């Protein structure tokens, strides 16, 4: 696997809390991430899969929540997440017009191991989130099919690639090449250590607004570009996936993931009208069985007063994950010869 340079390789350290050993969402034990990338002439797109644990997610669900910062998006599955407070499939990221095909693939993947679905039990809630990669990708071609879903899930591992890969292949962020980026933070509560990780699919923002670690660098980059593709309106999207092993209720989890908006804003996002800014989160602290045990269930969770560190951690991990998505993405030429430069072309001027 190619080793991309990330924020800390440029001596950019976001915040004060320590990162996990990989500084990725997979620092939360049990989580894996996989990609399928398609690059062929005008096609620049893909699928990214996040697996909350390595067992049967339909049978052993994780506590989940979602939060909409700005709802210009076509995400599938969040209604049931917020109603029931659980996640029962891998989470898929892709382009806007491929949500349907990804959902079909994810449903079939789940049916394969759960013959009772649609027979003796209910159906399944596939979770698919998207960003619009039409700048570099011929999105009308609808290149993603069900097999790409299976491939992305099979590819899932702890040490995965970032940048212009998987769902991030064709994404544009702050007028530069966006993609997949991740970060994590380790916190201590009542003498125990917990991890919070964030993975971002970045496709948002105006170049003039870009900030890194408090430095407003976007305008300088725009002025130095031969052909700046900055735009008047903020369009695009960002999908942020948050994972933790902290024992929390779905309500507490939703409070935590709301703070992704802080990290997002620290990079310069104004969450414009045409931007779908959506967060999906889960905790691996315990699982909830699909089948009733006919017993009263108990659930461990921390006291509300202990949440401040988690708020801090998720804001930092989100901010650094977004920056990593930019730095790990290489300069790319896509549909109709359109080109997006990597932030790495300019970062030496500032750090």
Image: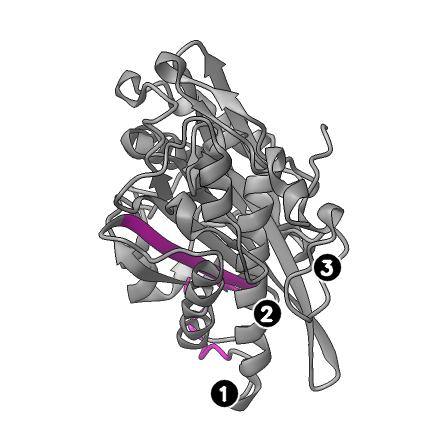
Magenta segment includes 21: no
Write down the region rendered in magenta.
275-298
On screen, residue 233 versus residue 243, left or right, reads left
SS class, disc 3: loop
Query: Can you say which quadrant of the picture contains the N terminus?
Result: top right
Q: Which residue is mark 2?
A: 313
The location of residue 160, given as percent across then percent down, is 65, 38
Q: Which residue is mark 3?
A: 20
**Residue 230's mark?**
none
SS class, disc 2: helix
**Residue 304's mark?**
1
- Judging depth in this view, the residue of 294 and 135 nearest the camera is 135
- Judging depth in this view, the residue of 18 and 298 nearest the camera is 18
The image quarter containing residue 131 is top left
Residue found 38% across the figure and 66% down from its top: 85
Label 2, label 1: how many angstroms apart (C-alpha)? 16 Å
């Amino acid at each position: 696997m190619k080793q991309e340079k990330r924020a800390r390789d440029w001596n950019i350290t976001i915040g004060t809390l320590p990162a996990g050993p990989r500084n990725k969402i997979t620092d939360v034990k049990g989580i894996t991430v996989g990609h399928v990338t398609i690059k062929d002439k005008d096609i620049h797109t893909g699928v990214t899969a996040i697996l909350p644990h390595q067992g049967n997610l339909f049978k052993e669900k994780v506590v989940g929540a979602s939060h909409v910062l700005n709802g210009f998006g076509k995400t599938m599955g969040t209604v049931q997440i917020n109603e029931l407070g659980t996640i029962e499939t891998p989470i898929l990221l892709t382009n806007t017009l491929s949500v349907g095909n990804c959902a079909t693939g994810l449903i079939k993947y789940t049916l394969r191991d759960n013959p009772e679905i649609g027979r003796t039990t209910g159906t399944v809630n596939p979770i698919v989130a998207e960003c619009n990669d039409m700048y570099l990708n011929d999105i009308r071609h609808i290149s993603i099919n069900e097999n790409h879903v299976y491939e992305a899930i099979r590819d899932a591992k702890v040490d995965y690639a970032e940048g212009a890969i998987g769902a991030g292949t064709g994404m544009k962020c702050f007028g530069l090449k966006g993609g997949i980026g991740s970060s994590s933070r380790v916190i201590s509560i009542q003498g125990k250590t917990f991890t919070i990780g964030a993975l971002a699919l970045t496709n948002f923002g105006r170049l003039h607004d870009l900030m890194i670690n408090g430095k407003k660098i976007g305008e300088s980059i725009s002025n130095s570009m031969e052909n700046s593709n900055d735009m008047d309106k903020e369009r695009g999207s960002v999908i942020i996936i948050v994972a933790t092993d902290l024992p929390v209720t779905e309500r507490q989890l939703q409070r935590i993931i709301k703070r992704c908006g802080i990290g997002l804003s620290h990079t310069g996002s104004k969450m414009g009208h045409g931007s779908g800014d959506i967060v999906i989160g889960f905790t691996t602290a315990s699982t909830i069985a699909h089948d009733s045990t006919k017993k009263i269930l108990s659930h461990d969770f921390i006291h509300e007063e202990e949440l401040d560190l988690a708020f801090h951690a998720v804001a930092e991990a989100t901010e650094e994950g977004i920056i990593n998505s930019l730095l790990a993405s290489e300069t790319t030429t896509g549909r109709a010869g359109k080109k997006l430069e990597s932030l790495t072309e300019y970062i030496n001027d500032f750090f």
